[in-house]
Amino acid sequence: MDLFIEKIQQLRGLMLGVSFSAVILAPLAIGISLYMMTHPKFLHLIENEGEFAILLTVLLTAVLVTSGIWLVAGIQQFRSLSNWNQRYTNYMKKRDDLDKDISSKFHLDEE
C-alpha cells in the first residue's frame, strides 16, 4: 500500500504541472480568441469571406469551449491535488506516530 501511495505522490508533480498549464494557457487562448472575434476586421472578414469565415468562427468557438473546459478541469484538479497533499501529510504523520507508539510499546528502539 505504501508503494502505491508513494507512486501517486510522485505522479502528483506531473498532475500539478498539467493543472498549472491549464490555469495559465486556457485563459490566454480564451483571450486571444475573444480578441480575434471582437476585432473590427473580423466582422469585415465574415462579410467578405463566406465559407472561410464560417470555418474560422467554428474553430474559434471550439477553442473557446475547449479552453473553458480545460480551465475548469485544471482548477478542479489543482483543488483535488491540494486536498490530496493535506491528506498525504496527515497520513504520514499518523503513520510515524503509530510506528513510534509500537516501537516504544514493544521496546523495539532499544536494540
Image (cartoon, rainbow, N blue to C red):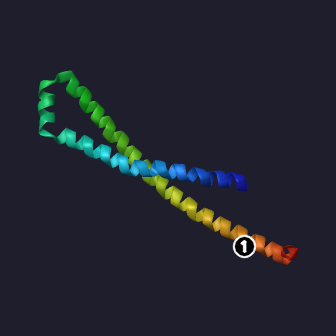
Residue 25 appears in the picture as rendered? yes
Q: Amino acid at mark 1?
A: Asp
Q: Residue 60: give x, y in percent of width and height.
A: 28, 35
Indicate whether 33 appears above or below 88: above
Residue farthest along the front direction in this orientation: 111
Count of numbered marks:
1
The quadrant of the picture occupied by the N terminus is bottom right
Rendered residue at 11%/32% (across/down): 44
Q: Residue 48: give x, y in percent of width and height.
A: 12, 25
The quadrant of the picture occupied by the C terminus is bottom right
Q: In screen coordinates, is 65 left or right of 92?
A: left
Label 1 secondary element: helix
Residue farthest along the top direction in this orientation: 51
**Which residue, given by chain and number where applicable, does mark 1 sit on?**
97
Assess disc 1: are there few (<14), some (14-19) or many (≥20) residues with their C-alpha within 10 Å of its C-alpha.
few
Residue 57 location, quadrant: top left
Q: In screen coordinates, is 44 left or right of 58?
A: left
Residue 97 location, quadrant: bottom right
In the depicted view, which residue is nearer to us: 16 or 81? 16
Q: Residue 41: give x, y in percent of width and height.
A: 12, 35
Indicate whether 95 appears above or below 60: below
Residue 61 location, quadrant: top left
Rendered residue at 45%/50% (across/down): 19
Q: In screen coordinates, is 109 left or right of 94?
A: right
Rendered residue at 81%/72% (across/down): 102
Residue 72 appears in the picture as rendered? no
Indicate whether 93 appears above or below 66: below
In the depicted view, which residue is nearer to us: 89 or 108? 108
